[in-house]
Amino acid sequence: MNWDSIREKVLEGKPVVLIDDRREFEADLVYPAEIASPEVVNFMLSMKGLLCFTMDMEVALSRGFFPLPSKEGETNFLIPVDYMENFTGITAEERALTAKKLAEALSVEHFRYPGHLHLLGGIGLNRRRGHTEGSLELMEILGFKRYALIVEILDETGNSHNREYTLRLAEENDLPVVNIDDVWKEFVRRKQLIRVYANARLPTRYGDFRIVSFDNELDFKEHVAIVKEPYREVPLVRIHSKCLTGDTLGSLKCDCWSQLTNALRMIAQEGGILLYMDQEGRGIGLKEKIKAYELQEDGLDTVEANEVLGYRADERTYEAAFQMLRALGVSRIRLITNNPRKAEALEELGMEVVGIVPAPGEVTEHNRLYLKVKAEKLGHRIPFEI
Ligand SMILES: Nc1nc2c(ncn2[C@@H]2O[C@H](COP(=O)(O)OP(=O)(O)OP(=O)(O)O)[C@@H](O)[C@H]2O)c(=O)[nH]1
Ligand SMILES: [Mg+2]
Ligand SMILES: [Mg+2]
Ligand SMILES: [Zn+2]
């Protein structure tokens, strides 16, 4: 993503189209409040959505703006305001002035309400991957203050989920287009939200390790690292997704236990790191994985079962693994895996995967089909005869 060229376009008065298509497609126009002009505000108003002003929630509260009732996970509205000296507050010129005055960090006394700019409080992209939080991180990435004007893009019929309409609008007006996922990845590259918390000896039947726990403000989960030092300048690394049935209960329905123990032996031998990630069920959790197992008893395969439950085939992402390795001072790795997506995801974030080491596992009559489906549908390179 070329953030500098996006900044250039913004400085020419072109708002950014910020797309959120993780659930249903929706796009907002986003523009730095500190340089809001009547022309840009007028263009944003022509999108027909609700013109809002975003800032970090704690900043809004510290300046005396108060929140309106909202439910967990929903957009956090605060009171709608106008700059005090505006006449009506509704014109593009007056709304641009209100935006600029809000971006000057003036407190609530300088504004009257109810007004025409709806205030939205961002609670952090690590807590909520919404347009409000995405707009604030985007402003910072582009070098502006953390204040943005945003408005939903509605098509001719007033529908806000029209991808074709949105992309045509961007094309016709030469607007930069950014996906919230691009902002999220840049956020993960720039802000370290996982820090080492504790580090203790862990003698095991596979070798002597240390176990490391983390303060994790990125996804707030309890992932741990099993470390064998000394390790080479480019350490051997295994990113192992938790599998209670396999790893703990010795289930024969998957190859996790054999992969985990083989990886621990390899790392005990050579030195390296095993990240044990709280990503049960390829990210859908234990409860739902058991439901997926139940569906597989009715003939669905491991991918179809996830999809019938409303999930993607694999819900896992690797930002936490990336930041755990960075917290351990590691930026280049040799990765033990049969799953090419893991290496791709880590490289996209900036980790250098110098090499792939096949992850040996065990085939049983109970996991043969599962392994076949992973090879055929999830692109796994299974290094052993299935
Ligand atoms: N949803 C779902 N998850 C499963 C199923 N079987 C195993 N898992 C989970 O899959 C994860 C392990 O993923 P795998 O595909 O086996 O291996 P991988 O980690 O992607 O790739 P490797 O690095 O080669 O092991 C663990 O979180 C398991 O709980 C299943 O049938 N459905
Ligand atoms: Mg939205
Ligand atoms: Mg595996
Ligand atoms: Zn498993």
Image: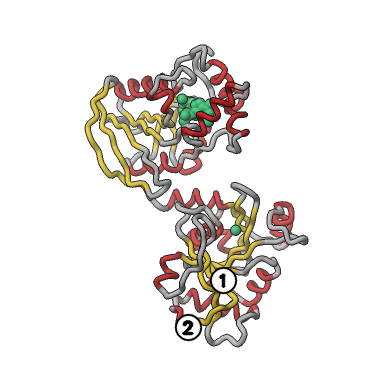
Label 2 secondary element: helix
Bin the neighbour count of mark 2 within 10 Å (Cα to Cα): few under 14, some 14-19, many 20 and up. some
Q: In this view, does 172 lie to the left or right of 279?
A: right
User: 330 and 59: which one is in front?
Assistant: 59
Q: Can residue 340 be seen in this view?
A: no
Real-space Cα separation, disc 1 to disc 2, in angstroms: 16 Å
User: 266 and 163: which one is in front?
Assistant: 163
Q: What residue type is labelled 1?
A: His
Q: Mark 1 points at which residue?
A: 118
Q: Name the residue under label 2.
A: 110
Q: What residue type is labelled 2?
A: His
User: Between disc 1 and disc 2, whose residue precedes?
Assistant: 2
Bin the neighbour count of mark 1 within 10 Å (Cα to Cα): few under 14, some 14-19, many 20 and up. many
**Residue appearing at x 55%, y 29% in the figure:** 292
**Residue appearing at x 43%, y 52% in the figure:** 190
Q: In this view, does 271 lie to the left or right of 166?
A: left
**Residue appearing at x 54%, y 77% in the figure:** 81
Image: 259 above or below 158: above
Q: Residue furthest right?
A: 156
Image: 329 above or below 248: below
| Quadrant placement of the C terminus | top right
**Residue appearing at x 52%, y 34% in the figure:** 288
Label 1 secondary element: strand
